[in-house]
Amino acid sequence: MADHNKAPGSATAGVWIQVAAGLKNPAMRELLGQVLTGQDPERGAAGARGSKDLARWEQIGLLRRGQTGAWELNEQLLGDTLAAAGAAKADRSGINRFFDGTKLHTLPAKPADRMQVMAYLRDAVIDGDEQLREDQVNERLRVFHPDTALIRRYLVDHGLLLRAADGSSYRRGAGQPAA
């Protein structure tokens, strides 16, 4: 089995797609700002929504509970991401040869390579149990390629992304090569 997680920016690329999506949300951005300025975000958090947003930052890995129990920035994630970005620039093997940084510059012609690239993109944009609207999928895919409809279609065609029958949402699929 190919290790498609060793692609551009390594597995941390998917984390940063989620960080960017979190930063786009004003409530999540405000909670992060409170942590960064030394405030207690739980004191000002808007009930269940605030708790859910803090849990989401924790799930992403950007925030964690420190030894005192206070929320803090996960410095290790930042260091790992910078190291992975440097390593990815140097590595032009495997599916990295189709990327320039995080940007997909060439869609692979070979089905096996295309499946690996698509599996990497799927892993980078959607967690195992997430269910996203089309605009959310597009927002995350745009980090990798401007033609989000094309990439989304490839993901669906390869069984890596499953579209709800009513078209309202997408979730992860196991993935099978397109016929």
Image (spheres, rainbow, N blue to C red):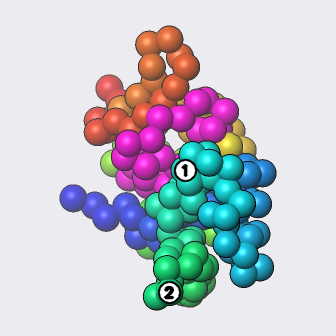
Q: Residues within 10 Å of mark 2 (few under 14, many from 20)?
A: few
Residue 62 visible in the picture = yes
Residue furthest to the front: 43
Specify the quadrant that holds the C terminus: top left
Is residue 123 located in the magenta-colored stretch of the structure? yes
Disc nearest the viewer among 1 and 2: 2
Residue 86 place in picture, x, y as percent: 58, 85
Q: Amino acid at mark 1?
A: Lys
Decide which of 28, 132 is in the foreground and name it. 28
**Tag 1's secondary structure?**
helix
Residue 52's tag is 1
Residue 145 visible in the picture = no
How far apart, in angstroms, are the residues tagged by discs 1 and 2? Answer: 21 Å
State which tag comes first along the sequence, 1 or 2. Answer: 1
Q: Amino acid at mark 2?
A: Thr
**Tag 2's secondary structure?**
loop
Is residue 71 located in the magenta-colored stretch of the structure? no
Q: Is residue 84 left or right of residue 29?
A: left
Q: Is residue 124 above or below residue 152?
A: below
Residue 68's tag is 2
Residue 150 place in picture, x, y as percent: 60, 33
User: Residue at coordinates 62% horizontally, 48% vertically from top-left?
Assistant: 47
Residue 141 place in picture, x, y as percent: 61, 46
Q: Is residue 26 above or below residue 155?
A: below
Q: Which residues are magenta?
A: 116-138
Tell me which corner region of the image, top left, top right, bottom left or bottom right, holds residue 138: top right
User: Residue at coordinates 57% horizontally, 85% vertically from top-left?
Assistant: 75
